[in-house]
Image (spheres, rainbow, N blue to C red):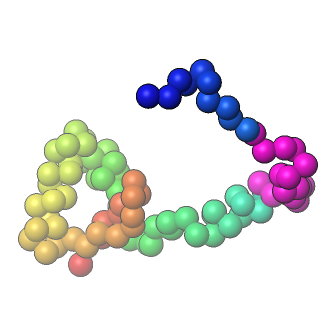
Amino acid sequence: MPNREATLRIAPSKGDAPVKPEPPDDLWERIAEVDASVRNKRPPNTFTRAEFAERFHLARATAFDRIKKMMNAGLLEQGGSGGYIWYRLK
């Protein structure tokens, strides 16, 4: 087994590194605009689980169970993605 202390490591010299380009001054504003344009936008006449729970004064788990039952019965359709799911009547 080689002696770890005797291992020589050579780091690249600073002269070999590529020059990092400077980002534009308005980079974060431009990213925010692009993000807003592609973010999930909810269609009209839709609701979320949280809104359903609040409207019917239910715990979120109970609301989700009721929504699943309506989905299984073919009464609701689901859309969105990730943490932003919406539902609407078929």
Q: Which residues are magenta?
A: 11-28
Image quarter of the C terminus: bottom left
Where residue 51 appears, as percent x and y from the top left, is: 35, 51
Residue in front for this viewpoint, 70 or 85: 85
Residue in front for this viewpoint, 89 or 85: 85
Residue at the far top in the pictured view: 5
> Is residue 46 found left or right of 36 in the rendered image?
left
- In this rendering, is residue 22 above or below 87? above
> Is residue 45 found left or right of 57 in the rendered image?
right
Where residue 58 appears, as percent x and y from the top left, is: 22, 42
Does residue 26 show up magenta in the picture? yes
Q: Which residue is at a point 21% across and 71% down the rendered structure image?
A: 76
Residue in front for this viewpoint, 8 or 72: 8
Does residue 69 show up magenta in the picture? no
> Is residue 9 found left or right of 43 in the rendered image?
right
Where residue 8 appears, as percent x and y from the top left, is: 67, 32
Residue 58 appearing in the image: no
Where residue 1 appears, as percent x and y from the top left, is: 44, 28
Main secondary-structure element of the magenta-colored stretch: loop
Residue in front for this viewpoint, 13 or 85: 13
Q: Which residue is at a point 25% across and 73% down the rendered structure image?
A: 77
- In this rendering, is residue 55 above or below 24? above
> Is residue 75 found left or right of 79 in the rendered image?
left
